[in-house]
Image (cartoon, rainbow, N blue to C red):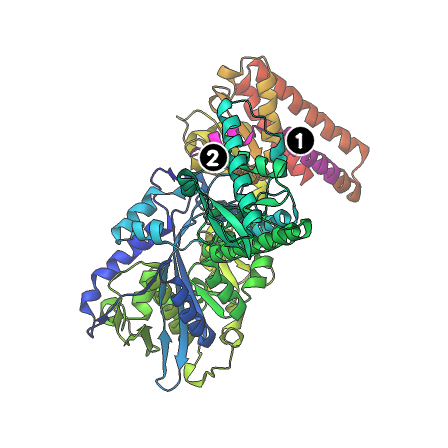
Amino acid sequence: MKKLYPITLSRALSRALSSSSSSSSSTSSSAQSIAFPLKHVTKGNFESALAELRRHVAAADFVAIDLEMSGVTSAPWRESFEFDRSDVRYLKVKDSAEKFAVVQFGVCPFRWDSSKLSFIAHPHNFYVFPRQEVPIDGPSYEFLWQTTSIEFLAKYQFDFNACIREGISYLSRGQEEEALRRLSMAYEDELSDTWCNLKEVRDIPINRMADVLFSERIKNTFSKWRDGLLRDGGSQLQLNSNDSKQQFQTVFFKMRPALSLAGFTSHQFRLIQMVINKHFKDLSYIRVNGDDLCSQHLVVYTESKDDRGMLMKEVKDENRRVAEMKIQAAIGFRHVIDLLSAEKKLIVGHNCFLDIAHVYSKFVGPLPLAAEEFVSSVNKYFPHIVDTKILLNANHVLQQRMKKSSTSLSSAFALLCPQIAVSSKSTGLTFQQCVQVEVQVDDMRSSNWNSGAKHEAGYDAFMTGCIFVQACSYLGIDFKLHSPSENLAHNEKLCKHVNHLYLSWINGDIIDLSTGNKVAELFGTNYFKKKYLNILFENIVLIWGFPSKLKAREIRECVSKVFGPTSVTSVYHLDETAVFVQFSKPEFVSDFLLLKETLEKSDGPISVLHPLAKLLEGGNTHAGNYETYKEICSSPISKVLFANQAEAVGIKWKGEAVEPKIAVESKERSSFWEENAVNNSTRSSEKSKQGKVHNAKKDMLGGNYEIIDSLYAAEVNQIRTNNL
């Protein structure tokens, strides 16, 4: 496990900060709460807890979930930015889900009790750890720990020992299928040492005198034992040597006399196999895999070739059964995920796109490369998902009230569930009557519950469910009219919000898991539209590796001197080594990239005279369009600095990515001119102007930049204006 630098914008830390104000006022609760702990589940009580959870989920109207992870972002530039397009945002979520581990998984089924007019919640807090239970090729599991997440978990008394030593392991569906495939291949392989003896050991060279003496002693021992069987008819099966009794024990295996072998090295076992195969046709060496990962080595007497074949098949079948049981046992916590998927219950989370990505990555299989493939596959396993953060922005009354507070989990819980979290007087707001929620853990039950431990995944899942039922009440859903046979996901007042998840809360991107499309309209998204309306991805150039002393203002000045004072609309730092520059026109992107390439190939005194000299100083400055940024984000590599990331990925600047765009622009301009019947003289005039620009570039390389600077900008603007 790797240790990372502190990152302030982690999901875990933000939840801690947002909850501090609400938790400090919890002592003013209007009613005394009853404290009893969550249902904590480790590998020791997993089987019984799973059986109990099956009953609760089957009877539930919905199930709330929450995850605690070992981290969120593997580098600062992998944070969510407003300049992140939706496909890039998915790639960042994918990177997070693949690199970090789930250490706690909260599952809380909610059932409507019509007799008490309240919901009954059953919070479960599962400790999860990716322990390698089934031998597979390659190294053991690896994941990252983010220091801010460790600090956050430690602050709230997270039990790291319980997680690592007692955490429930798991296999994804993909890992289970691969393990069963390999098991089937091994079963069919007659030479596999998993099932019977190694025939290829006949070719082991015996060069050492110790191996010669050992092989001869083993041969004599087996001969004496077999001869005793044949001579005495099975009445005398004990070896006479006291030394042999320590390593050989006569037993019956599958109704056949056998010697159990113990105290030998792996090399000696191979020599034993060689001796058996070479000198004894009526003895068979086998290895039986035990339930406790231990293997039993035996030499079994068989009466005939057919009897030997039957023995081998029985051993192979037994070993396969044991191996399949090990694989089933290794599925572990995925049984919970399979349960939620099979029951098709409504799954409720809070800002849960990353949570769902973790669920898919850990328990289904590798995350697809594209967001469209991901949401399509997720929808097959979990057809009904609700994000409470969506609901908090879907109702006018809720939206107005939440404006006075954060929509974080703890803040929303304090505002909407004052009878559980804090007194409603502390918010200064008057809320409608809350939906009653009772908590049951084993034999303990309370309508005013305090777990005694905040920010555990099980408790956060409980808070998420409570927020959901209160938000549903604001949407006009009357649970008093709710029938247990009714699927809550199909409620007409809720269904339009089902499967809508925030792909990015930063810029308000919402994706529909049912269709894979971005949701165009949502009540309350005007804030995002106004703030990020002017982001045009085709106008963005990515620059990295420039001198670290340069600030955004200086970079804007360098570029504006060449392309005009209004050519750059914004400059945004990804980190200290990379920036986004958004131009006012998309054609400036290709112009900038070509000019940069031309300047770098020139032998002229550009380091002193050209406006871009400061930007290109040092010879390490690279640039690309927005697709280059996407390609860098898609790499599984994660360097702390973006410039190092680009270098590791192997991207400096791809001219071929720009040239096709220029060719397309040329075709578009030709088509435009033809459609508007521009005559040949006009075209000649344009070519003449372009020639001036070309000469201007040459003059710039020659050193007359003060004069040519304005001429170049004027000519470029004039040509672009004519073409537009």
Quarter that holds the N terminus:
top left
Q: Is residue 36 left or right of residue 122?
A: left
In the displayed structure, 445 sits above or below 662; it is below
Residue identifier under label 2? 579
Magenta stretch, residue numbers: 640-669
Image spot of residue 439 (x, y percent): 32, 73
43 inside magenta stretch: no
- Quadrant assignment, res 521: bottom right
CA neighbours of label 2 inside 10 A, class few (<14), some (14 to 19), many (20+)? many
Image point (38%, 51%), residue name: 11
Q: Is residue 626 left or right of residue 391?
A: right
Q: Which mark is residue 656?
A: 1
662 inside magenta stretch: yes
In the displayed structure, 50 sits above or below 271; it is below
Q: Is residue 289 left or right of residue 144?
A: right
Image spot of residue 275 (x, y percent): 58, 35
In the displayed structure, 25 sits above or below 172; it is below
Q: Rounded to the nearest whole Å, what is the CA distance between mark 1 and mark 2?
A: 22 Å
User: What's the amino acid at mark 1?
Assistant: Glu
